[in-house]
C-alpha cells in the first residue's frame, strides 16, 4: 500500500535510488539526495530534508516494533491456552 512517503518505481529508477533505500520513506530520500549533491554534501545545508527523512525512518521503526509486540503477545496467548 503506497503512502505519501513512498515514491513510485519509475521515480526511484530515474533518481538512481539504491535498492536498500527503497522503503516506506523513499519519497523523502529523493529530495534529500538532490540537496546533498547540489550542496556538495555540506552537513548543515540539508538539515530540513534530513530531519524529515530520519523522522519518517523512526516512525516506521516504531510502527514495526508495535506490530512485532502484538505478534509476540498473540503468540504468548496462544501458547498459554
Image (cartoon, rainbow, N blue to C red):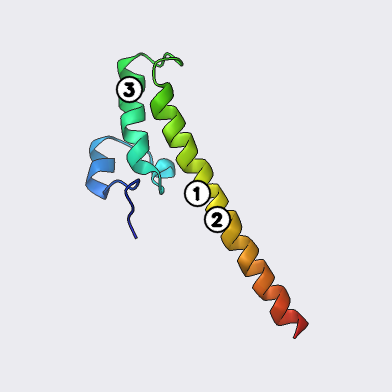
Q: CA distance from mark 1 to mark 3?
A: 23 Å
Query: SS for tag 2?
Result: helix
Q: Secondary structure at mark 1?
A: helix
Q: Is residue 30 left or right of residue 25?
A: left
Horizontal side, residue 54 vs residue 19: left or right? right
Give the CA separation, mark 3 to mark 2. Answer: 29 Å
Categorize mark 1 by other alpha carbons within 10 Å: few (<14), some (14-19), many (20+): some
* Circle 3 residue: 35
The image quadrant of residue 64 is bottom right
Q: Which residue is mark 2?
A: 64
Which mark is on residue 60?
A: 1
Q: Residue at x 27, y 49 (%)?
A: 9
Residue name at image x 44 percent, y 43 percent = 20
Residue at the location (36% across, 13% down)?
A: 40
Q: Is residue 75 above or below residue 26?
A: below
Q: Which mark is residue 31?
A: none
Mark 1 / mark 3, whichever is N-terminal: 3
Please state, as top left, top right, bottom left or bottom right, where the N terminus lies in the image. Answer: bottom left
Q: Are marks 1 and 2 in contact (CB under 8 Å)?
A: yes
| Label located before the other in sequence (3 or 2) | 3
Q: In the image shown, does 9 or 55 lie closer to the viewer?
A: 55
Q: Position of residue 23 (x, y in %)?
A: 41, 48
When asked about the image quadrant of residue 41, the answer is: top left
Query: What's the distance in space between the residues labelled 1 and 2, CA to CA?
Result: 6 Å
Instruction: Check disc 3: other Cα within 10 Å, few if <14, some if 14-19, many if 20+.
Output: some
Q: Is residue 39 above or below residue 78?
A: above
Percent coordinates x, y for residue 16 in the rendering: 30, 35
In the rendered view, tell whether residue 80 sits above or below residue 25.
below
Q: What's the residue at 34%, 14% (across, down)?
A: 39
Amino acid at each position: 500500500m503506497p503512502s505519501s512517503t513512498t515514491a513510485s518505481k519509475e521515480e526511484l529508477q530515474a533518481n538512481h535510488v539504491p535498492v536498500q533505500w527503497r522503503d516506506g520513506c523513499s519519497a523523502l530520500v529523493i529530495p534529500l539526495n538532490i540537496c546533498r549533491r547540489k550542496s556538495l554534501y555540506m552537513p548543515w545545508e540539508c538539515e530540513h530534508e534530513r530531519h524529515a527523512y530520519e523522522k519518517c525512518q523512526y516512525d516506521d521503526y516504531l510502527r514495526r516494533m508495535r506490530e512485532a509486540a502484538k505478534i509476540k503477545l498473540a503468540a504468548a496467548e496462544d501458547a498459554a491456552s
